[in-house]
Amino acid sequence: MKDVSLPIYPVLLAGGSGTRLWPVSRELFPKQLAKLCGEDSLVQTTIKRLSPVLDTNRIRIVCGAHHAADIGRHLQQIGIDPKDKIVSEPCGRNTAPAVLLALHRVLKEVDDAIVFIFPADHVIRHPKRFQEKLLAAARLAEAGFIVTFGIKPYYPETGYGYIEGGDPVEEGARRIRRFVEKPDRATAERYLQSGNFYWNSGMFAFRASVMAQEFERYQPDMSERFRQMMNGMTDVSMEDYASLPNVSIDVAVMENTRIGVVLPADLGWSDIGSWKSLYDFLPKDESNNVIVGDVILQQCHHCFVMTQERMIAVNGLSRIVIVETPDAVFVSDMETSRDVKEIVAVLKAQKRLQVQNHTTVTTPWGTRTTLEVRAGYQVHRLNVFPKEQVTIAPDPVRMKTLVLVDGTVQIHQNGDIRTMKLGESVSMAPSLEAELIVCNETEKDAHLMEIETSIRM
């Protein structure tokens, strides 16, 4: 960036699970990995809108260790090498520890830098306006301010926190007077009328050295504990990281610092915190419906209908949300669709599998889709990525059979190597001994069916 002299590191925070967008978002498949607004996932969209203003080769993504492989794959899909770009959190500890982790990584590479913080799962309707604000925020950050992007409200939203702006500074920014929690309707309407309250977007810009100093000033115990646990270390242990306070960057630093400014922005921004907010963001048809997938609507208006696998036909409904996935369907009134998080809590209490993951699970080697589970057998579809391999472990009570339905693979079993061609199969008898390795040495995906059959002894 020509207007600033320091290097710039965009940092994406990608650690959330987004339970309010269940059944699409799951614990092991958070909403930033989902394709909700087009052909790209939310994390891919977030990265793409930074270019060309910010150098995406300097991007760093803070995410849970169990999401790192997925995030890496999403980076590769948009032409970015994930090497050294993913910062894994051993467990979720809110945004303040995540920012500290990112600062540690950046300051190991350079003496100082401008750091941008972006949630990986938000959307922006006007990317050009956003890029103009990036330039202004970078200049403010280099001057020593800690900048937060304040979204100009256009209706009295009660689901967002607000920032009150004070005296003006350069670049159209205002000093932060205070942060306020999610208001009631009457208070939100007063904020809207006042003209100096802004939605808290969770996006920031600052010099790494300045934010480190503010952590030391306002969170000395957390800062010192983090320094000790990272002394000479690249990664932090689960035990050490879990001992850090579960606190947001707003509470830890932004509500205390005297150098915080809010940069007002009209970006068409949304945090996509509910199915209704996604409905509000997406384009509508002539009946104000949002349709995603194979959907037939008759005499419906103001509906949101999304399907991933099956055809959905809806007749004579209004202001309804319907979301279909291969293993769960969510139906709700539009206005109360945010309450899906309460359903998720019930599913967690019942230990239902639909909370944790989808029927298709992504791994470093490919994907595994569960097609059918019965008392005596299970059927899965394996997709092995190019130049990857998967190990099939033996089972003491189940026969495992693999059938190649697309591509070519090599089978390593009992010291033997053979090429498996289309339509061929290989079986593993119940055993505790030799494993089977499936290697895809080609440049295209290979697809196999895996059938597990219980053998009664």
Image: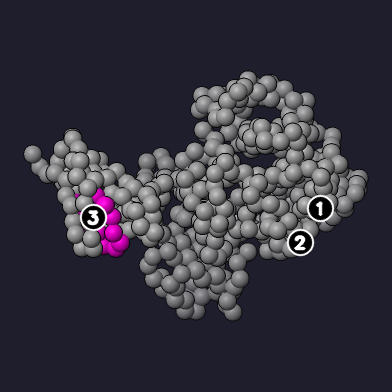
Residue 428, horizontal then vertical, whole percent: 17, 45
| Residue range (magenta) | 401-411
111 sits to left or right of 177: left
- Residue type highlighted by circle 3: Thr
Q: Which residue is mark 2?
A: 129
Instruction: Examine the rendered structure and indicate whether residue 281 appears above or below residue 109.
Output: below
Image quarter in which the C terminus is found = top left
388 sits to left or right of 227: left
SS for tag 2?
helix
Q: Which residue is mark 1?
A: 2
- Residue type highlighted by circle 1: Lys
SS for tag 1?
loop
**What distance separates the C-alpha of mark 2 from that of mark 3?**
54 Å
Residue 226, horizontal then vertical, whole percent: 63, 25
Residue 384, horizontal then vertical, whole percent: 35, 53
Q: Earlier in the sequence, mark 3 or mark 1?
A: 1
**What distance separates the C-alpha of mark 2 from that of mark 1?**
18 Å
For image coordinates 57% across by 53% down, the residue present is: 80
Q: Which residue is mark 3?
A: 419
Instruction: Examine the rendered structure and indicate whether residue 232 appears above or below residue 331.
Output: above
